[in-house]
Structure formats: structure tokens, C-alpha cells
Image: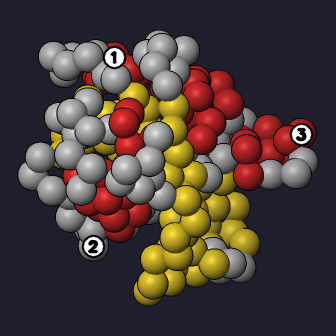
Amino acid sequence: IIKMVDIQSKHITKQYVSFDSIYNDIHTLYKKIKQIPVNIDCIVAIGTGGFIPARLIKNYIEVPVLTMTVSHYQDEVLQTKTKHIQLIQAETEESKFIKGKNILVIDELDDTRTTLAYITNKLLELQPNKIIVGVLHNKDKEKSGILDERVTYISSKKVKDKWIVYPWEVKDIDKHNKLSIL
């Protein structure tokens, strides 16, 4: 069960997700991941939304966690150009965790799929053995980003196309919790 409440703000309908729902979605995601007959060597968290889900999935899959961060949004508006913040580059210490390895890429949300496509294409340049993408929530809408055929995609669940507010994005967790309880 996902506990969400719709709130209109700036003409955007927002849904507030509780930590309890996230923990349940992490467990569901893990069960789907373990059905794939491959041992995960490394988790790549997509920042910043994927940081906490990656840490939570690490409770089940005890491997190193690396991060890659790009930005497509500014002030809740989708931008046309990708902003690089942190990437794993070839010939670095981090790239040794990727080449020839089975990588699990974690993010909280698949909205347009642009970030997932961008990050997985960058990782494919580093020659992993396998890339699996795991997201908590997959928005039920047409995607502009396309994943390479070598990437396996898993989501915990599909959700409506609304702005989702996660507990790690707020300053007032008590208010958030009140909004996330149905």
C-alpha cells in the first residue's frame, strides 16, 4: 500500500509518500531484483533522490555504493539540458567497481526516463558486465528517455503522473507525515 495524499501547490498536484511506504517498496523492489539470476557487485545511487533508496536496498544487498548525480529539474521545471554534477569517469578508482561487474542502479522515481538513460549510457561506456536499473516508483506515462537494450529495468510499482514528495525532501517531517497518511 502506498500512502499518498494529493495536494495542489503552484498548479501541481503533489503526493506525499511516507517512510513506511518507502520501506515496503524497497522490500518489493529487492524481491524483484533477486529474481534476476545475477550477483550484484556494486550499487550506483542516482543523486540526489536515489541516495536513500540505495542505502536502504544495501540492507539486502551488501555491496559498495557509488554515486552519480545529474540534474534535469530547476524549481520543479524540467530543463532541456542535463547538468553534470558527479559522474564516474574511466581510469578512476571508482571505475574499477564498474568494468566487468554487475551493477545495480537505484533511483527513487522514473518520470521521463531521461536521467536513467543518461546515467546508464555513461555506465555502459565503462564496460560493465550487466546493468540493472531499480526504481521505487515508475510514473504511468510516456517516457522520452530510452534505455539501451542491454539494461534490465525493474520498478517497485507504477504510480500516477503527479509530483511525488519524498520524506527526505522536506524540512518539516511532522507536516509531511500528516499529509502522507490517508
Which residue is identified by label 3?
Answer: 174
- In the rendered image, the vertical position of residue 23 relative to residue 164, given as above or below: above
User: In the image, what residue occupies the spot 80% across and 45% down?
Assistant: 176
Compared across the picture, whether 114 is left or right of 13 comes to left
- How far across and how far down the image is residue 90, in percent? 35, 53
- Other-residue count near label 1 (Cα within 10 Å), few / some / many at <14 / 14–19 / ≥20: few
Nearer mark to the viewer, of 3 and 1: 1
**Disc 2 designates what residue?**
144
Which residue occupies 52% across, 70% down? 84
Please name the residue that numbered disc 1 is placed on.
31
Crowdedness near tag 3: few (<14), some (14–19) or many (≥20) residues, C-alpha within 10 Å: few
Callout 3–callout 2 Cβ contact below 8 Å: no
Q: CA distance from mark 3 to mark 1?
A: 30 Å
The earlier-in-sequence mark between 3 and 2 is: 2
Earlier along the polypeptide chain: callout 3 or callout 1?
A: 1
**Whole-percent x and y of residue 150?**
12, 46
- In the image, taking residue 113 as reference, residue 37 lies left or right, namely left
**Label 2: how many Cα within 10 Å (few below 14, some 14–19, many 20+):** few
Q: Is residue 74 above or below residue 27?
A: below
| Residue 27 appears in the picture as rendered | no
- Quadrant of the image for the C terminus? top right
